[in-house]
Amino acid sequence: MPNTIKRKITLKLNKLQKCLTGIKGFDEITEGGLPKNRTTLISGGAGSGKTLFGIDFLINGAINYKEHGVFMSFEETADELFKDVASLNLDLKVLVSQKKIVLEHVVLERKDIQEKDFNLEGLLIRLEHAIESVNAKRVVLDSIESLFAGITDNGILRLEIKRLFGWLKEKQVTAIVTGEPGQDSYTHHGMEQYISDCIILLDNRVDEEVSVRRIRVVKYRGSNHGTNEYPFVIDDDGLSVIPITSAGLNQPGTAKRVSTGISSLDKLFKGVGYTKGSTILASGTAGTGKTSLAAAFAIETCKRGERCLFLSYEESAGQLIQNMKSIGFNFEPLIKKGLLKIASTRPTFVGLEKHLLDLYKTIDGFKPKSVVIDPLTSLIGEGSPREVRSMITRMIDVLKTQGITGFFTSLVSSTAQNDTSGEIGVSSLIDTWIVVRELEEKVGKKRIRGLYIVKSRGTGHSSDVHKLILSDDGISLEPMEADSTSTPDPKKKVGSGIAKKSKKINKST
């Protein structure tokens, strides 16, 4: 047998086995979950989600992987744990009654944790009985600080922790122990971090009055893993690290096209409309018709019998429905048929990651073929420019990986010096970019709306400025007469599309 094949077989045999946690996103950053039949330390301050991580791990194991579990608590009783997860969609009480999870509350007396009388035998016997009673494959100890609180001698402490971790390994269980970070260490004792095979750090911080949760894999023996800090949220379904990072540039290309919902706008794309599964951005100042363009696209999606999700960050569903009636767009029949779903929320209500998680869940449940987000710029104040851009990049990734056509609107300040995609600056991530602006006719000094296409990757398109008309019958575009308009402020530049008024058909690639 060649040496290369021998090496490959040896590597395969020696590859670390992993235990899937079932926690959304976490198994991806750890490339398969926690180290199987080994001990993981979950470190974090008060309210960071340590206990919930452990409970989630056990519940997912019992429901999804047919692995029963034991939760041994040194601080909370079973009733207190039931109350902790009562507001979440976690069936802890049911699983305990079905004997798939065992809850053990250990009351530690002062004499039990004194250094001279310290003995783990009684605890190990109780833990062994709990494991055998349900043939458990997963164990959570919450928290290790309480168990070793009375030991001050580092030598004894290290031996006892090593003894506990070794015992758990002998029992062939995947174990989690929780701890609180101390000064310059991941636990108060500082010994567990050296003996643990894996260390997960949870953090709940407040940045500019916004609470943000982060998770980081500090250590993982024998395995590759993501080393960055990753945002996570706790919602009705437990803990979710979603999305973890950008999905990457691996989306397949397509030649399929979908209508814009406006026949005269389709003609500007050589009559074929937007690329299916691409991203479209309509940017402009207030009142220029960005939401109306998005509404036309949403209705056209529904006309094809496909579902469309409309996320509104500025108007309630009722306001949006009423406002769109003024240009002949009736959302109500489409909503009743289940083809259109309008979700309205204030951007300040939750953090960026919660917005993104809600989008994931809604897409997963509703299965839309198109998603409208109006406007993206409402998210600016909910994080730093880097965080906002990262969130939008991941948002675009999730749409593209599922072949969903995304339509975004972006509000541009009326004092902007150039036609940009707004304060977010995501035009480079967009496949088709449409700019709508308020212009002023030279004759009569009447203000009108103008529209032109900045780019459309892979599609021939006109770069001429067209008059955008909103009426009772919907939306239409008309060619602009040469030298008939000027910008409201001569100090502002409208952009190359208006200044040059090129009549050529461009192809962007």
Image (tube, helix red, strand yellow):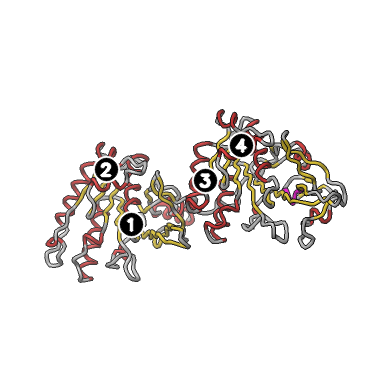
Disc 2 versus disc 1: distance between alpha carbons?
19 Å
Nearer-N-terminus badge (4/2): 2
Give 30 or 397, whichever is nearer the viewer. Answer: 397
Vertical relation: 308 (above or below) 218: above
Q: Main secondary structure of the magenta part?
A: strand
Q: Callout 4 environment at 10 Å: few (<14), some (14 to 19), or many (20+)? A: some
Residue highlighted by disc 3: 345
Name which residue type carries label 1. Answer: Thr
Residue highlighted by disc 1: 40
Q: Which residue is drawn at 22% across and 65% down?
A: 159
Question: What's the mark number on residue 322?
Answer: 4
Mark 4 or 1, closer to the camera: 4
Q: Quadrant of residue 167?
A: bottom left
Q: In this view, does 155 lie to the left or right of 414?
A: left
Disc 1 versus disc 3: distance between alpha carbons?
38 Å
Nearer-N-terminus badge (4/3): 4
Given contact means CB atoms under 8 Å apart, are the residues at marks 3 and 2 in contact?
Answer: no
Secondary structure beneath dot 1 equals strand
Name which residue type carries label 2. Answer: Ile
Secondary structure beneath dot 3 equals loop
Give 181 or 211, whichever is nearer the viewer. Answer: 211
